[in-house]
Image: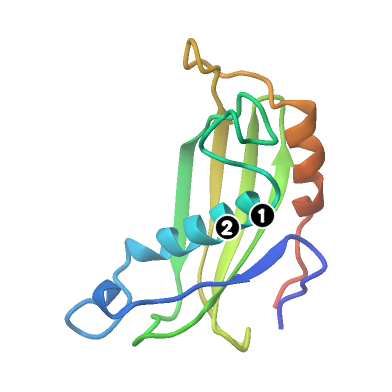
Amino acid sequence: MISPSHGHIAPVRVHFDELDPMGMLHHSHYILLFDRAISAYWNEHGWDTDPAKAAFKEVILVVRDLNITYHVPITGVSEPLVHFWLEKIGRSSVIYGFRVLSSDQAVVHAEGRRVNVNLDPATFTPAPISAEAREAAIALLGVPAQA
């Protein structure tokens, strides 16, 4: 079992149209599962694409680096879990770790790491992460126990 003491675990859904001809989740969709889980988490915590509605001002996080390792394919329509956490919060960037798990947490289907950089909305150059966003992100900080 994966320790839920760090980060967040979110259910996601694999749809029929995401499967390849062999009935397995297409490799490009694993990162979409992570994106869906993390977007839902931050939406619940006040993030919005509309800056007028967002709890965090001037947050434009873009992906700088992404890696993923596949272990066991997801087959068929299902509801796996995505476990994600922050490994590090820097001045203008964050490093996420994540795992795509079976619904019973017994199988790690894939795991990876993603670096996001906050950009200044006027210049699109790296900008400091706001105090409000940093404070909200602290709940995700930590490294989970190994399975």
Q: Which residue is drawn at the image coordinates 66% and 54% (left, top)?
A: 44
Reading the image, the residue beneath label 2 is 40
Q: Is residue 84 left or right of residue 108?
A: right
Could you say which is closer to the camera, residue 120 or residue 93? 120
Tell me where residue 32 appears, x and y as whole percent. Answer: 41, 59
What amino acid is labelled 2 in the image?
A: Ala
Rendering quarter of residue 118? top right
Q: Residue at x 73, y 35 (%)?
A: 133
Q: From the viewer's perspective, is residue 123 above or below residue 48?
A: above
Which residue sits furthest left? 21
Mark 1: which amino acid? Glu
- Location of the C terminus by quadrant is bottom right
Horizontal and vertical percent position of residue 135: 82, 38
Percent coordinates x, y for residue 3 in the rendering: 77, 74
Q: Secondary structure at mark 1?
A: helix
Residue at mark 1: 44
CA gap, disc 1 to disc 2?
Answer: 6 Å
For label 2, the SS is helix
